[in-house]
Amino acid sequence: MSVIERGYGDGICEYTNDLYCRNWLHDAWLLLDDCVVQLWTPQIKALGDWYRAATVDDDGQALDQFHKLPGPDLWWWRRHPRSLTGELGRSLGSAGAIGTDPDTT
């Protein structure tokens, strides 16, 4: 079980830094040759599916209270962990994010 599934205990700055890492992959993808893209597309899709399952789509409303969101094609910025714990959970919860109690999931 990953930190996203258990509840991301770090704060907004750390979470947005992690999201920026995903931006890098998005930007770099355009520079890769077709062979590499074909090889890695199934793994990237699987990780994207996993992230969607472990997070809630709120169109970025809670996170936008703390950090300006990038363009709409960067869908991962519009989601937050289902389990709202720690500093991130308190911050996003104060901005109206709704999650699940990690003790009951």
Image (cartoon, helix red, strand yellow):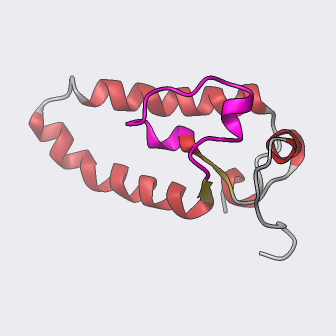
Question: Residue at position x 20%, y 48% from top?
Answer: 39
Question: Residue at position x 31%, y 25% from top?
Answer: 28
The magenta stretch spans residue 62:
yes
- Single out the residue that lies furthest toward the bottom: 104
Image position of 22 (left or right of 13): left
Q: Position of residue 23 (x, y in %)?
A: 45, 28
Q: Splitting the image into 4 quarters, where does residue 91 fall? A: top right
- Single out the residue that lies furthest toward the left: 34
Question: Residue at position x 64%, y 29% from top?
Answer: 16
Image quadrant for the N terminus? bottom right
Image quadrant for the C terminus? bottom right
Q: Splitting the image into 4 quarters, where does residue 13 fall? A: top right
Q: Position of residue 49 (x, y in %)?
A: 44, 60
Which stretch is magenta? 58-77
- Secondary structure mainly formed by the magenta segment: loop
Q: Position of residue 53 (x, y in %)?
A: 54, 64
Number of dots carrying numbers = 0
Vertical arrangement, residue 63 with respect to residue 51, above or below: above
Between residue 12 and residue 10, name the one nearer to us. 12
The magenta stretch spans residue 73:
yes
